[in-house]
Image: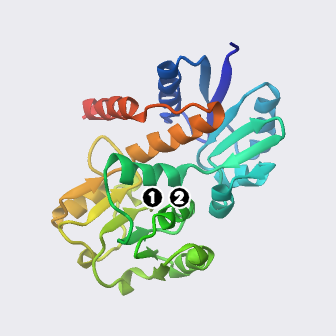
Amino acid sequence: MSTMHCAVIGYPVAHSKSPRIHSAFALQLGLDLAYGAIEITPGTFAEQVQKRFQEGYTGLNVTVPYKEEAYVLADELSPRARLAAAVNTLHHTPDGIVGHNTDGIGLVHDLTERQSVELHGKRILVLGAGGAVRGVLGPLLEKQPRELVVTNRTVLKAEQLRDIFAPFGPIHAASMDDLSGTFDVVINGTSASLQGALPNMPATVLRPDTVTYDMMYGANDTAFNAWAQSQGVTRTLDGLGMLVSQAAAAFTIWTGLTPDAEPVMTALRRELTAVT
């Protein structure tokens, strides 16, 4: 069996855990996989992607800032990628390059399967209106929540997402100041946690039994989750599980094999904890 070649591409990319995750999946399933991290200089994305596929690569994971460029480059798009207007997984097939988006699948799998959080019939608040949020709204609405509210500092962006996703379920847009009532699940899709900052969200939307979820993760609680805990929330989750689950979905697209994400997740969590 010949070696399968895959990689994660982005700028920067040295920090990515994708090589660690996919190599673990391959080892688990006895697959001969060479998986690397390729930093692509801005302005050369399409050229570099085509070069890798001409060299025989099977798949590429796409991280910031290239998910929109990957969307444009793909010859064919999965329904989720088309709706998200962003691609995080490229698959080289005999018919061309197929673009997928597994971010939303990863989030929903982590919430519902790994963490046993019920989304059906629940009131969900999503903070932010950027590409990360657009990528998860479709899969969240597939779970048939009672209401999904998108809030953003610039409410116009939230309203644009509402208009795009309105055919798929009960989605609404609101400014941070206009949020009313409490929510069962609050998902932070802003990048504020990367700077240790907080979105300007009123604590009145939280209850002690609200589940908060930050798409970011780290060795310690994110700023968002630490704040939620200070407001009395008893269950706070981070995005490490989303990372591993979206990687597992990409791995399955390329190989047709389904890895067991749990031991990989456990190992990564242990490594993060050991850093502190």
Residue 103: % across, % down? 53, 51
Q: Quadrant of the C terminus?
A: top left
Q: Name the residue under label 2.
A: 132
Q: At x 19% / y 60%, what residue is drawn? A: 229
Colouring style:
rainbow
User: Separation of disc 1 and disc 2 at Cα?
Assistant: 9 Å
Residue with the most extreme top position: 1
Q: Is residue 165 visible?
A: yes
Using a 10 Å C-alpha cutoff, classify the residue at mark 2 as few (fewer than 14 neighbours), some (14 to 19) or many (20 or more): some
- The answer to whether the residue labelled 1 contacts the one labelled 2, judged by CB atoms less than 8 Å apart, is yes
Q: Name the residue under label 1.
A: 191
For the residue marked with disc 2, what is the amino acid? Ala
Residue 164: % across, % down? 62, 75
Identify the element where label 2 is drawn: helix
Say which of 49 and 140 sits in front: 140
Q: At x 43% / y 82%, what residue is drawn? A: 175
